[in-house]
Amino acid sequence: MKKTKVSSTNQVNKNYLEDICMGAYALGIIGSRWKLSIFFNLKDRPMRFSELKYSLNGITERMLALNLAEMEKDKILTRIVFAEVPARVVYELTPIGKALTAVWDQLDNWGRQHKDLISADALL
Amino acid sequence: MKKTKVSSTNQVNKNYLEDICMGAYALGIIGSRWKLSIFFNLKDRPMRFSELKYSLNGITERMLALNLAEMEKDKILTRIVFAEVPARVVYELTPIGKALTAVWDQLDNWGRQHKDLISADALL
DNA sequence: CAGCATCCCAGGTGATACTG
DNA sequence: CAGTATCACCTGGGATGCTG
């Protein structure tokens, strides 16, 4: 009645993969649900917490805070706090964060090609 | 005692995102746990089910079958069945599937840069 | 304003056993 | 060999309420 085991195979292999394949490593860092959108919002200019919240239309504060924290830890963005009375915090992409642009552009392209292909097929 | 509700905000926004951003759309198609690895294995040559199974070291048959099915549906790969006694099936990337190479290369590059940066920082 | 703490649920995966 | 069927689990993410 213990349940002592716990899969483990999971983590082991995932880490193994991320060690040998930088693509997997990268996805682990930037592949979660909201990060792509956060990136797109921050791409052109720094934004504050609430701006992002409204812009990301639908994200919960919890998720926004969590994702921003992770991205900060991973040096994708910088958190700048202003010691003012109504707290103010802005988020800005770091150089390595901005370097993601190339990746997303590539991905965007592929997505477009793919969607066109699928729609074309749908017509047959 | 029903639980009739169901979030829904989730799906709605996700679909919305995928409509306006091809990157999100693309990630939805190729972003799941094993697809990246399956792609890498198939990149150079077609492979059979069991080859993939052993090569992917750790994947369950269930997951392999599910992912292959999805990728086939999404036209990332083709399934070729040989009507032989011990069943034989090989999987091969389609052109649109091969086109992913550019994306992954880009991602790989970014991952490498990122990892270097992080390790460099760790030394300070 | 910018979060954090709690509680909870659903879907993606894993383990295991069975089949054409 | 190449899957399918079941059952169970864990983690990402949502809802809600509180705080400096």
Image (cartoon, coloured by chain):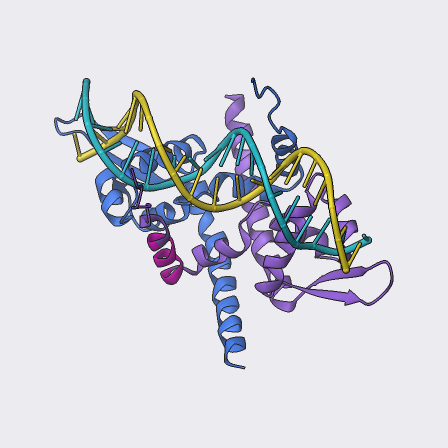
Chain colours: A purple, B blue, C cyan, D yellow
Image quadrant where residue A99 sits: bottom right
Q: Is residue A109 magenta?
A: no
**Residue B36 as seen in the image, left or right of residue A49:** left
Instruction: Tell me residue A121's x, y (percent).
Output: 50, 27
Q: Residue at x 17, y 29 (%)?
A: B87
Nearer the observer, B4 or A14: B4
Question: From this viewpoint, is residue A112 visible?
Answer: no
Instruction: Tell me residue C13's x, y (percent).
Output: 38, 40
Tell me which segment is drawn in magenta.
A12-20
Q: Is residue A13 magenta?
A: yes
Question: From this viewpoint, is residue B96 visible?
Answer: yes
Nearer the observer, A81 or B46: A81
**Residue B114 as seen in the image, left or right of residue A83:** left
Nearer the observer, C12 or B68: C12
Total marks shown come to 0
Q: Residue at x 65, y 56 (%)?
A: A68
Placement of the N terminus of chain A among the 4 image quadrants: top left
